[in-house]
Image: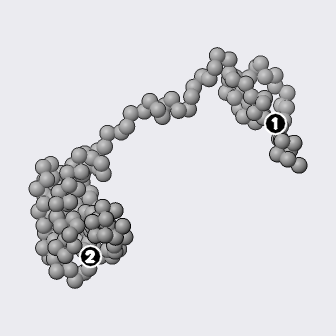
Amino acid sequence: MTDDTRPRPVAPDLGAPTEDLSSTDREASAFFSGPEDRQEPEGGRNKDYLDGFLNAQPNTPVRGAPGGELYEQIVETLREIYDPEIPVNIYDLGLIYGIDIDDDHAVVTMTLTTPNCPVAESMPAEVEIRTGSVPGVGSAEVNLVFDPPWDPNKMSDEAKLELGML
């Protein structure tokens, strides 16, 4: 049997005349019938499901949220700090695991390439000082974590390209 000759399910006749149906009921009835049985509602489509989507305005990012102005300023500041052993900034290197902003307090969660990194003491302090210097940040804090451990897969494509890994 080919696809054209297969029987198709038909909605059971519930005995209600179609002229007494609301437009929603007619649309539902058309949904359960075959494509050739479907008819446009009188006067064309009442509402297109894309209308709301296409007319919606994008949400304005919250000041400290990813994509927000303060968040982006902190990211740009962190991109100015370079790992002394690798010629890539610490953000693109994947050492920054998160930036949380609450009012004017910024918390940067970061790691190092290895726990025995020679800049284990100075790098977090530099990140804290630089983050605290961003206009709009009243105080900054750095959480240094080693779980999950850093690996080269955390690097951005730009960093991989810079290091000849792409």
Q: Residue at x 31, y 65 (%)?
A: 161
Q: Secondary structure at mark 2?
A: loop
Q: Residue at x 30, y 48 (%)?
A: 67
Badge 1 local density, few (<14 within 10 Å), some, or many (20+)? Answer: few
Q: CA distance from mark 1 to mark 2?
A: 64 Å
Front one among 32 and 15:
32
Q: Nearer the viewer, mark 1 or mark 2?
A: 2
Tally of marks? 2
Query: The disc labelled 1 sits on which kind of residue?
Result: Ala
Front one among 91 and 158:
158
Q: Residue at x 53, y 32 (%)?
A: 50
Residue 140 shown left or right of residue 115 in the figure: left
Residue 36 shown left or right of residue 119 in the figure: right
Query: The disc labelled 2 sits on which kind of residue?
Result: Thr
| Residue 34 appears anywhere in the view | yes
Q: Position of residue 110 (x, y in %)?
A: 25, 68
Badge 2 local density, few (<14 within 10 Å), some, or many (20+)? Answer: many
Position above or below: 33 against 117: above
Most distant residue in the top direction: 43
Q: Position of residue 131 (x, y in %)?
A: 16, 59
| Residue 94 appears anywhere in the view | no
Position above or below: 78 against 135: below
Q: Position of residue 145 (x, y in %)?
A: 27, 73
Q: Quadrant of residue 125?
A: bottom left
Give the numbered dot on residue 162. none
Give the numbered dot on residue 113. 2
Quadrant that contains the C terminus? bottom left
Which residue is labeled 1 in the image? 11
